[in-house]
Structures are given as C-alpha cells and as structure tokens.
Amino acid sequence: MKALNTHKRFLKLLFLTTILFFCVNFSFAQLTITATQAINFGTICLTGSSGTVTVGNDGSRTSTGNILLLSLSPVAQPAIFEIKLCPAGTVNITYDASTILTGSHGGELTLELGPTDKGISGSNFTTNSDCNIITPVHMGGTLHIPAAAQAGTYTGSFAVTVNQQ
C-alpha cells in the first residue's frame, strides 16, 4: 500500500511539473545574417608583373604594382552582410583570412579578406537596438594578382560567422 501512495505522489509531481513547464515563457534571441552584396574589384588590367587591388569596406579602390584600374562596369564594391539580432546585443564576427578565386579561363587568385567596418576578424560589436532595424556590415579585401594571371572573371566564396555574446 505504501508503494502505491508513493507512486501516486510521483505521478502528481510529474503532472504538476509538466504543467509548469508549459507555462514558462522561454525567450531566446533570434540571430540572422544575410549576404546582400558580393565583393567586386571592378575591371582591372595587368600591365606587367604582379600587383594587388584593394577594395575598402567603404567601397574605395586602390592598387599596387602593375595594375591599371579601369572605370568600366562592373564597378568596385565591398561585400555587405545584414545582421539582425532580436533583442539587440553584442555579437562577434569571424571570417576566413583568405580564399582562392577560380578564373573563368583558368588560373587562381588569392583574396585576402577584411577588414569590415566593424573591425578585423574576431571583433565584437553591438547590433542596432530595435528588433526591426538591420545592422549592415561592409567588408573589403585585397586581391593578389600574379604576373601570369589569366584574363577573365574570377569567382569564389568565403565563410562569415556571427556569434551572439
């Protein structure tokens, strides 16, 4: 008889715990990141040996070595990511140091990534305080072009990770 009463008490406790579990309001932050614009170095011409082209996170473009920057389409632009954290808070952004781009007619170029307008890889920053406002992140990079680079369009991808702090 004592075991039966203990079993009934256990079932009542389990039932009440289950009811309380469903009454508790769980609140989790919602974090999304969306790539809205790819980085583009514009139209360039290699006039001799190697060089680099840098696109700043503000969209500015400079070159070193034997690189001629042309004013033709497509134009240079930074990569843009949109981050939404609701409720707002601090996030940490990390990304690959570099990636390899593959040419449409062969060849490879190295793209050195960063910095963003929020800092270098590993930087923390605070998102906008309104859940309906998106925090944009602009990322630049430097394209390393060897003397033997093939003409064409070069494409590739890289990872960006955003973690809530």
Image (cartoon, helix red, strand yellow):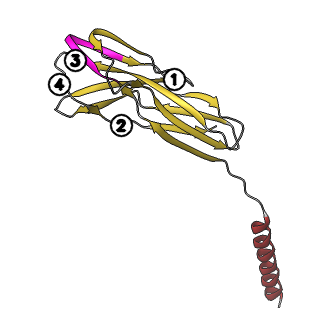
Q: Sequence order check: which comes first, mark 4 or mark 2?
A: 4
On the image, the x and y values in percent for residue 5 come to: 83, 86
**Residue 69 locus on image (x, y percent):** 31, 14
Q: Amino acid at mark 3?
A: Pro
Mark linked to residue 150: 4
Most common secondary structure along the magenta stretch: strand
Mark-to-mark CA distance, 4 and 2: 19 Å
Relative height, residue 49 to residue 85 (above, below): above
Mark 3 or 2, nearer chain start: 3
Q: Nearer the viewer's eye, disc 3 or disc 4?
A: 4
Give the mark, 2 or 1, whose residue is nearer the N terminus.
1
Question: Which labelled disc corresponds to residue 66?
Answer: none
Name the residue located 57 percent from the left edge and 45 percent from the top edge: 32
Q: Which numbered mark, 1 or 4, is in the foreground of this view? A: 4
Under circle 3, the secondary element is loop
Determine the CA span between mark 2 and mark 1.
Answer: 18 Å
Q: Which range of residues does the magenta coloring cover?
A: 42-53
Circle nearer the N terminus (1, 4)? 1
Residue 47 shown in magenta: yes
Disc 3 or disc 1, which is closer to the eye? 3
Q: Is residue 17 above or below residue 127?
A: below
Q: Residues within 10 Å of mark 2 (few under 14, many from 20)?
A: some
For label 1, the residue is 120
